Image (cartoon, rainbow, N blue to C red):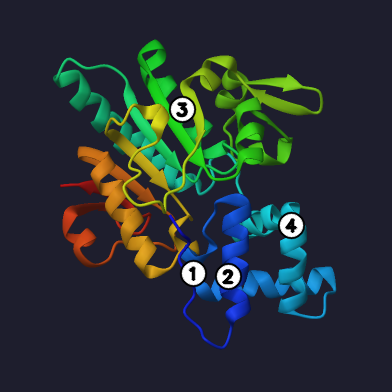
């Protein structure tokens, strides 16, 4: 599918830039929030000391690595274990027990979770640890997706510096991490629960991650992802996430994100302040 374009007759270079990045990376920057896109490009031009947008476009046409660098810059990848601890406390104390009880009432075991826009993997491993602590060997599967192949490879290794673990409670640290030089590695039991794969949320009709065998999910975390996209594509992503949830399943958004339009009528707010919603 051809990339979406930014409709601005005064900035033909921007449409050309979007097209060049699409041809090189198959990532459609035209779907991102246009103000954010222009700001990231301006920041990159300033860093490279180029004369202006046209010179930067010429560079992109000559250097595939710079195209990939611009894609990476569009999603500032900031992550840590138990980022926003209150959210994970609510998931641990309220969301997971309800989901587990419902599964058990229907004679089912395990949970299916999707960490959409998983960045370097900390969120996916965090939820896997919480689930494993409650379910042990019947824990289930966490599907973690992102559009950055290098980041996904880093996440699969599960090796992190100590500062990424500042919010991990001592009991979880001792149980689920092993020393790895100056760093720590996620225990193999937890790494085996998490399946990392490439998935572009903006592609129409792509649905759930391929590795998930197109099943629905009990819980989806899509935190601090929607803020990067245009309103149109936020609506598309939210519809996709809604359709990917089982009835009564939970959706967790980032603190600066919210449901709007028809999506608000399709969810109940379990905790609106912390952006935790239950599908009706």
Residue 258 at least partly seen: no
Q: In the rendered structure, find residue 33 and report the number of the disc placed on it.
A: 1
| Quarter of the rendering containing residue 164 | top right
Residue at position x 62%, y 62% in the image: 20
Q: In the rendered structure, find residue 66 and report the number of the disc placed on it.
A: 4
Measure the alpha-carbon separation of dots 3 and 1: 31 Å
Q: Quick check: 67 left or right of 175? A: right
Name of the residue lying farthest toward the top: 137
Residue at position x 16%, y 59% in the image: 265
Q: Is residue 267 above or below residue 186?
A: below
Percent coordinates x, y for residue 148 in the rendering: 60, 44
Give 164 or 141, whichever is nearer the viewer.
141
Where disc 2 sits, the SS reads helix
- The nearer-to-camera label among 3 and 2 is 2
Marks 2 and 1: CB-CB under 8 Å? yes
Residue bearing the label numbered 3: 128
Upstream in the sequence, badge 3 or badge 2? 2
Percent coordinates x, y for residue 43 in the rendering: 72, 72
Where disc 3 sits, the SS reads helix
Residue at position x 58%, y 15% in the image: 188
Q: Quick check: 271 left or right of 146? A: left
Upstream in the sequence, badge 4 or badge 1? 1
- The nearer-to-camera label among 3 and 1 is 1
Give 106 or 33, whichever is nearer the viewer.
33
Q: In the rendered structure, find residue 37 and report the number of the disc placed on it.
A: 2
| Quarter of the rendering containing residue 247 | top left
Q: Quick check: 205 left or right of 168? A: left
């Amino acid at each position: 599918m051809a990339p979406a374009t930014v409709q601005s007759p005064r900035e033909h270079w921007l449409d050309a830039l979007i097209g060049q990045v699409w041809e090189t990376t198959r990532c459609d920057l035209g779907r991102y929030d246009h103000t954010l896109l222009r700001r990231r490009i301006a920041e990159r031009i300033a860093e490279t000391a180029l004369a202006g947008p046209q010179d930067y476009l010429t560079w992109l046409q000559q250097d595939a690595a710079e195209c990939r660098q611009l894609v990476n810059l569009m999603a500032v990848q900031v992550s840590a274990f138990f980022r926003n601890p209150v959210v994970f406390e609510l998931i641990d104390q309220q969301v997971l027990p309800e989901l587990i009880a419902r599964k058990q009432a229907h004679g089912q075991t395990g949970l299916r979770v999707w960490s959409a826009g998983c960045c370097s993997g900390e969120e996916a491993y965090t939820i896997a640890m919480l689930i494993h602590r409650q379910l042990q060997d019947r824990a289930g599967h966490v599907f973690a997706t992102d559009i950055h192949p290098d980041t996904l490879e880093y996440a699969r290794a599960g090796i992190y510096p100590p500062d990424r673990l500042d919010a991990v409670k001592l009991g979880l640290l001792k149980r689920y991490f092993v020393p790895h030089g100056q760093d720590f590695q996620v225990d193999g039991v937890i790494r085996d629960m998490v399946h990392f794969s490439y998935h572009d949320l903006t592609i129409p009709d792509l649905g759930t991650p391929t590795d998930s065998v197109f099943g629905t999910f009990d819980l989806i975390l899509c935190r601090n992802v929607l803020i990067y996209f245009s309103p149109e594509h936020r609506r598309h992503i939210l519809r996709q996430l809604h359709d990917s949830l089982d009835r009564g399943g939970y959706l967790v958004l980032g603190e600066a994100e919210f449901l709007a339009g028809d999506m608000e009528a399709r969810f109940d707010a379990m905790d609106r302040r912390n952006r935790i919603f239950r599908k009706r």
